[in-house]
Image (spheres, grey):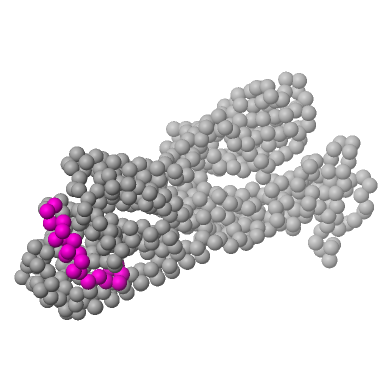
Amino acid sequence: MSELLQSLVEATFAGSAAVLLVLVLRRPLRARFGAVATYALWSCVPAALLAVLLPAAVVDAPGAAVSWATPLQAAIAAAPAPAARVDPAPWLLALWACGAVAMLALLAWRQSRFVRALGPLQRRGDGCWQARVDAGLPAVIGVLRPRIVLPAGFEVRYLADEQALILQHERLHVRRGDLQLNALAALLQCLAWFNPLAWIALRRFRLDQELACDARVLAGDPAMRRRYGETLLKTRLDAGPVPLGCHWQPIHPLKERIAMLGHPVPRRTTRLAASALVALLALGSGFAAWALQPADTRPAGAAGAAAGDLYHVDVRLDVDGHARQFALREHAGTTFGFRSEEGDTAWAIEMRLTPEADPALVRIQADLQADGTLLSRPELVARLDEKAGIQVSTPDGRSVFALDVTVRRLDAPVASAGGPRPAMPADRPPPRYPRSALAEGLSGEVLLVVDVDAEGAVRDARVERATPVGVFDAIALEAARQWRFQPARDAAGRAVPGQVRVPLRFDSGMTASAAPAGAAADDGMRWFLLDAGVASESVCDEVVRVPADARVYCGIRNAQAAR
């Protein structure tokens, strides 16, 4: 899932939960603390949405866990060609973007229709504007430069004290920033057009806004309740709400507004208690939305490591003549290991990498066990990109464990050299082993430079170095274009494009051999010696097993002979 789509899903869940909380609490809160507190309760929604945008908590993985590697050669030799997969994320994002644009166009049309219906506006001496119509007026329109628009015949329809109440109501909308809040609500409606709760929330939010404004007007003069109700009844209503404005709305909210006029004005202690409660609910909503995000789990000891503390480790393990190859990426300080149960002895080695003061060196610490007993704790300082070796035998000499390890420091992403994390593999199907190379018993290495975009997709891949030249290049590039990565992140935790170097080792695991006893004479067949049980048998045209020495012979027909 792309970063943007994941953020959209998280914001949808967080916003929906906050809206449900407000819808459940708004009526009891209004009955106990008044309409102003209920309107303030809607702050829980933006608090939850903003919290989702904050970086998730960083959790260290337990240091005792060991990441046990699996052999690489079997996966490379037997892996099928990577199948192309359709990523639904771009299509879902395109659908969401189309809906958001359509919603924005609809709201813009509603706003334009309302403003056009007002006709030419005439400036009044009191700073307000006079329209030639009266439906939906009085109203306040405009976000950056709010204007109070009064209906035609304003002085005729309303008495002097009613006019004062209307102007006080509209000016209160301007002072409280209600038009800017309505613009924010319209923006959220565009972004969450697919969420039914967003539509319900917008209607309830606009109603609570008017009720809170009514309550503030009457708090200054409770004796004007009756006159205020008569003023509401004289107003001609509009058919629908204006996205960027505050105006008089349809009949059902008007009934509720008149009913609210009979509620007593909350005392000062009640208002203070309501403010404290709403603040706690908003903070709690934000914290809950932030805490419920998936934690950013990093290996223990690597949470604060820079990108240079990530290593690529190539290992060739040989136990009593049975060879295995491993390739993995590990942060400095993490524990990883390898196991081998070839022969009569079960070997296990746990390793840790620690950077040295000299950036060209790395310290390798290991715990080596044979049949569950700690046998040795070798420690060596190796030079990066050069092979280092460990060899240990059991006390009786019946089993020998040999390990060659090459450590490379992975490059930091291009756009975030100072960032905390480079691009990391998320889905990396191994390349197919070229049959022609197997037929020749060829092994080799390809170093790829992979450009990764901010969504984790491979934008480009190229060969920096290959040995032997031209043998494994094409198959490595074919596999790389199917890979997916966790995108690189800058110091602020944002996903950014990056670049990584990926070394690929191709090891056939086969040694050229003479034809085994009993095999039919065939000049077009080349024979190789395999370790027992190696998955590379799937590429053989003929397999011969010799039970006496547990050897497996793999016959591969020469392509020219096959023709």
Residue 340 is situated, as x and y percent measured from the top left of the image, at 71, 34
Residue 303 in sight: yes
Q: Is residue 10 left or right of residue 481?
A: left
Identify which residue, 398 or 150, lies in the foreground.
150
* Residue 241 belongs to magenta span: yes
The quadrant holding residue 180 is bottom left
Identify which residue, 409 or 61, lies in the foreground.
61
* Residue 230 belongs to magenta span: yes
The quadrant holding residue 464 is bottom right
* Residue at image location 44% in from the left, 39% down from the top: 58
* Residue at image location 16% in from the left, 73% down from the top: 151
Identify which residue, 159 or 289, lies in the foreground.
159
370 is higher (above) or lower (below) than 34: above
Residue 384 is situated, as x and y percent measured from the top left of the image, at 53, 39
Identify which residue, 88 or 39, lies in the foreground.
39
Q: Is residue 518 left or right of residue 377?
A: right
Residue 146 in sight: no
* Residue at image location 27% in from the left, 66% down from the top: 249
The residue most toward the top is 395
The residue most toward the left is 125
* Residue at image location 82% in from the left, 59% down from the top: 558
How many numbered marks have been drawn onto this rendered protein structure? 0
The quadrant holding residue 374 is top right
In the image, the segment drawn in magenta is 222-242
| Quarter placement of the C terminus | bottom right
Residue 295 is situated, as x and y percent measured from the top left of the image, at 46, 42
Which secondary structure dominates the residues rendered in magenta? helix
401 is higher (above) or lower (below) than 79: above
Q: Is residue 382 left or right of residue 563?
A: left
371 is higher (above) or lower (below) than 86: above
Residue 316 is situated, as x and y percent measured from the top left of the image, at 66, 39
